[in-house]
Amino acid sequence: MASDPPPLSAEDEALLDRLAARLLELHMEVPAILALETSKPMTVVASQALIFFEPMIQSLFRFTDYRRFTALIERRDVMESLIRRIETGAEKARAQRAEARRTAAGRPR
């Protein structure tokens, strides 16, 4: 019987928000969701792989919360939360683009 995981701290929530926003900014929501969904069964292994590759990743990218992310990604509820954030952001962006197209075409809602 598994116990409920502890709730995410404000810093953890902010990290997930920043990560989701960056993925949306790069228009990488579909590959990110696909990667997250397929790696769900192996969250612990994925987290350990991230720790293994940390020196290389840190030399290429500036990611100050990398250790926090590797600890968070072990939890399946965090994976689900990140996926939901990406999907919600993608839906908002899609709605904004559709509204902008309607407005540009002279057909306001």
Image (spheres, helix red, strand yellow):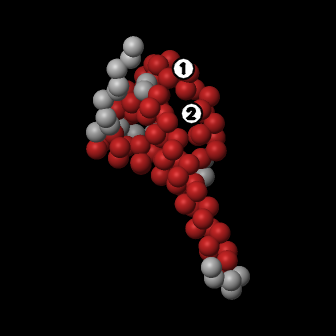
Tag 1 secondary structure? helix
Q: Mark on residue 36?
A: 2
Residue 41 vs 16, above or below: the answer is: above
Check disc 2 and report its element: helix, strand or loop: helix
Q: Residue furthest bottom?
A: 106
Q: Which residue is mark 1?
A: 42
For disc 2, the neighbor class at 10 Å (few under 14, some 14 to 19, many from 20) is some
Query: How busy is the neighbourhood of tag 1: few (under 14 within 10 Å), some, or many (20 plus)?
Result: few
The amino acid pointed to by label 1 is Met
Q: Is residue 103 left or right of residue 14?
A: right
Task: Name the residue: 51% across, 44% down.
Answer: 84
Q: Quadrant of the C terminus?
A: bottom right
Label 1 to label 2: alpha-carbon separation: 10 Å
- Residue 45 screen position, x and y as percent: 50, 18
First-in-chain label (1 vs 2): 2
Q: Position of residue 30 (x, y in %)?
A: 64, 44
Is residue 5 depicted above or below 109 in this figure?
above
Residue drawn at the location 62% of the way across and 28% of the way down: 38
